[in-house]
Amino acid sequence: MTIKHMLLGGTAAIALAVTACGKTETKAPDGEAPAAIEKVEAEQITVTDAELAGNPFREDWTGPYGVPPFAAIKDEHYMPAVKKGVLELRGEIAAIVANPDEPSFDNTIVALDQAGASLYKVMNVFGNITSTDTNDTLNALQSEIYPLLTRETDAINFNQDLFARVQSVYQNRDRLGLDEQDARLLELTYRQFVRNGAALSPEAKVEVAKINEELSSLQTSFGQNVLQSTKAFQIDVTDESRLAGLSPDFKAALKVDGEDKWILTADRSVFETFMTQAEDRDLRKQMFDGYRLRASSGEFDNGPILVKIAQLRAKRAELMGYKNHAEFQLAERMAKTPEAAEDFLKKVLEPGLKRAAEEKADMQGMIGDAFQIEGQDLWYYAEKVRQAKYDFDDNALKPYFELGAVRAGAFDVASKLFNITITPVEVEGWNPVVTSYEVKDAETGDFLGLFMSDMYARKSKRPGAWMSSFRNTSDVKGDRIRPIISNNLNLITPAKGEPTLMRFDEVETLFHEFGHGLHGLLTQIRYTTFSGVDGPRDYTEFPAQILEHWAGAPEVLETYAKHYQTGEPIPQDLLDKMNAAATFNQGFKTTEYIAASLLDLRWHMLSSEEAAKITDAREFEKKVLAEYGIPEEIEPRYRSQYFSHIFAGGYSAGYYAYLWSEILDADGFTAFRETGDIFNPELAGKLKKWVYESGGLREADELYRNFRGSDPTIEPLLKIRGFAEEEKPEG
């Protein structure tokens, strides 16, 4: 977390800061500064020396690599340290405003970039630990801390004297002799103040501040409800015959030690594996409903919360001078408008729906007249059809994808592409399963950062996979600070003494998150404001997604995909079957993803008047899905009630970004294939320089062109998804 994330505003931005944004009403004139206006006052905060005594966050971290002393940090340390950090940030902001010298790049813009170090030191840890090892105390603290930070954010964004200084420097930018990184920092700082409402009327600022505070609480509650409802769902199976079809390793991982009992949970890895393998249709139905109905009723019901979030976001966007929240969000993204994003999704959905209908017919043909296929059947019968069509069983691959070997394969790819070394080191982690690695430049020996890996699911950990940071990059005035980056997955913990064997989609996820990690580790940007994983949401998935292509490349598979017992590589005939089946079931996968993306857009394309009329989240959801012709048996990847990406994270009006970025990654990897060498040094050098090292240095389309030499085309994406024979949508 950095001052950038304070300026971005809102709980979603602050919470995701540690993880892997003609409006005359909000524009300040380039001429004179606006007249003085009322301030949004921050609350009174006090913290005593006694409360801070022995607090690890108030000490220098002198251990290896400056890693937080996790064992010493207790729940009671967070709030006092946050309060002290807020007070120190206020002092730094006050010093910038009170500086008697004329506003300058150094005394205003750089000072802002560097402000808040003690607060972010706490929040980088808090945001991570509440995602990986939370508890009731930390959940309660979230409900206190994030609204506090939201109020503090508004106090900064709406500080008219501070904005006047920023504006003064910005108006004189052409006379300052700034280099490219300096100029970009100034541009982004000014832009964020304006986008957050610094030029709004006093009345509008007060209203926006109230909305931000309410959103902060609602978004925190939404995320906590998803976690709690996921933890609450459990099926205890005591009749082993009901587990027919499960692979031995998966079944062993579900078993309770010392008991004839197997526990099914709503963790995504458990859910997908069970739905693919289990023969018991009734039990599949229980799992299917348990997963998709999370946070939909009872004490963890997110329906009313998400409706209120949508209403408040719509109102805030209108106050900012936009028609809706999606228009506000996409103004600085590659898609530019929600209509462009929607049109793109619809064009890819068309061949996806056609393919999904063909896939359904194949599955129904296998079932016959016994019953009509429903949602709980799709994974299971898709796998049966694949086995019949391609003589390919995904489980046959798992012995070749042992976690340690897969991770080594990802490291080897990065080393070859970017000329880096990655070496295991002994460092205390936040959980015993964490492993750590030192990353260096292979040529110079320069330390680039520490990479920490947390791969396993547990009840205290939120679902999904993500990259985050415990320390941000900065290189200002000779103080060179390199990042501490982490990756999180939710793999099933194997039975004691057994290896962690992965499905290939999990292998791709590991490569994906490591791509985000490299984006953070390799950055050569001096300023925290736009270093590392920075840029519009529909671009920042590109550095992660392009790395997935190496995971399945034959040249790479032969180096890491070896049988965990014999060391033998994957047999060629198994590889051939895997490649032949690569586009199988893409109709279902494309449709479920686009369904969720369209839901996201439609929630956030609502005007405040339209949003105010919605009282039932599920009814709105069903109406939207029906409009796009989504078959009832295909669930969106996320129902609205547990769609944390958009209602508790930083992806609101942005879930389409994964597919948009797929245009970039498919086109980008095609460039490597066209050279005849997927490790082509010249192209890899451009990828490193213009993508992984450059953060948000330039606009996203320019960074991509500098790497590729041209704009991307959509044809490679369609080919990868097996839709190339369909009518090609325009990119």
Image (tube, grey):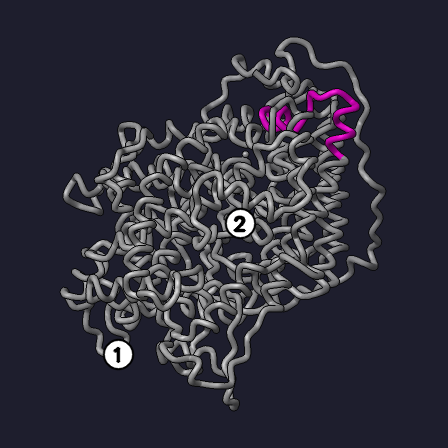
Where is residue 161 shown, x and y percent of the image? 74, 23
Q: Is residue 148 magenta?
A: no
Residue sitting at 84 percent across and 48 percent down?
46
Q: Is residue 697 left or right of residue 441?
A: right
Instruction: Give SS at disc 2.
Output: loop
Q: Which mark is first along the chain, 2 or 1? A: 2
Q: Give the dominant element type of the magenta stretch: helix, strand or loop.
A: helix
Q: Is residue 469 above or below residue 215?
A: below
Tell me residue 146's x, y (percent): 70, 48
Q: CA distance from mark 1 to mark 2?
A: 36 Å
What residue does disc 1 label?
A: 565
Q: Give the SS element for disc 1.
A: loop
What residue is pinned by disc 2?
A: 19
Side of 49 relative to 102 (left or right): right
Residue at left offset 33%, top offset 55%: 360
| Residue 206 covered by magenta stretch | yes
Amino acid residing under circle 1:
Gln
User: x%, y% of residue 517?
Assistant: 43, 51
Q: Which residues are magenta?
A: 190-209
Q: Is residue 539 above or below residue 705?
A: below
Q: Nearer the viewer, residue 652 or 383?
A: 383
Q: Nearer the viewer, residue 61 or 266?
A: 266
> Compared with residue 489, is residue 304 higher up or lower down, i.e. above or below?
above
